[in-house]
Amino acid sequence: MSQSLTVSLAISDPQRSFRFYRDGLGLDPVGDLAPDGMPEPLQFRLPGETYLCLIPTGGFGWVLGDRAIAAPDTSECLLGLSGASTRA
C-alpha cells in the first residue's frame, strides 16, 4: 500500500517562498509551471512520498473549509495522509 504525506504551510509571498525553498534549501518543485514560472499548486517533493505545499494565506481558508484560519501572529500547517484503498 503506497502512502504519501503532504505538509501544507500558509505563506504571504509566493515568489519569495518559492525562491527560498528552491534556491535556499535546494528542494525540487513539482507540477506544471504557471505563467509566473512557479508550479501550480506550489509544491516541493521531499524525501520519500512526502510533499511540501505552500498556500497563499488568502487561499488557506479555502483549504480549511469551515474552520477559521489562525490569527496573523500564529503559525499554522495542515498534514494530509493519503493511502491506497483496498476493496474486496
Image: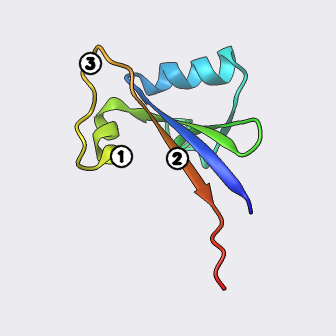
Front tag of 3 and 2: 2
The residue under the point 62% across, 45% down is 5
The residue under the point 50% across, 18% down is 16
Q: Which residue is mark 1?
A: 63
The residue under the point 26% across, 18% down is 72
Mark drawn on residue 80:
2
Q: Residues within 10 Å of mark 1 (few under 14, many from 20)?
A: few
| CA gap, disc 3 and disc 2 | 22 Å
The residue under the point 57% across, 43% down is 6
Q: Residues within 10 Å of mark 2 (few under 14, many from 20)?
A: few
Q: Which residue is mark 3?
A: 72
Amino acid type for the residue under numbered disc 1: Val
Between disc 2 and disc 1, whose residue precedes?
A: 1
Amino acid type for the residue under numbered disc 2: Gly
Could you tell me which secondary element the residue under label 2 belongs to? strand
Amino acid type for the residue under numbered disc 3: Pro
Q: How is the image coloured?
A: rainbow
Q: Residues within 10 Å of mark 3 (few under 14, many from 20)?
A: few
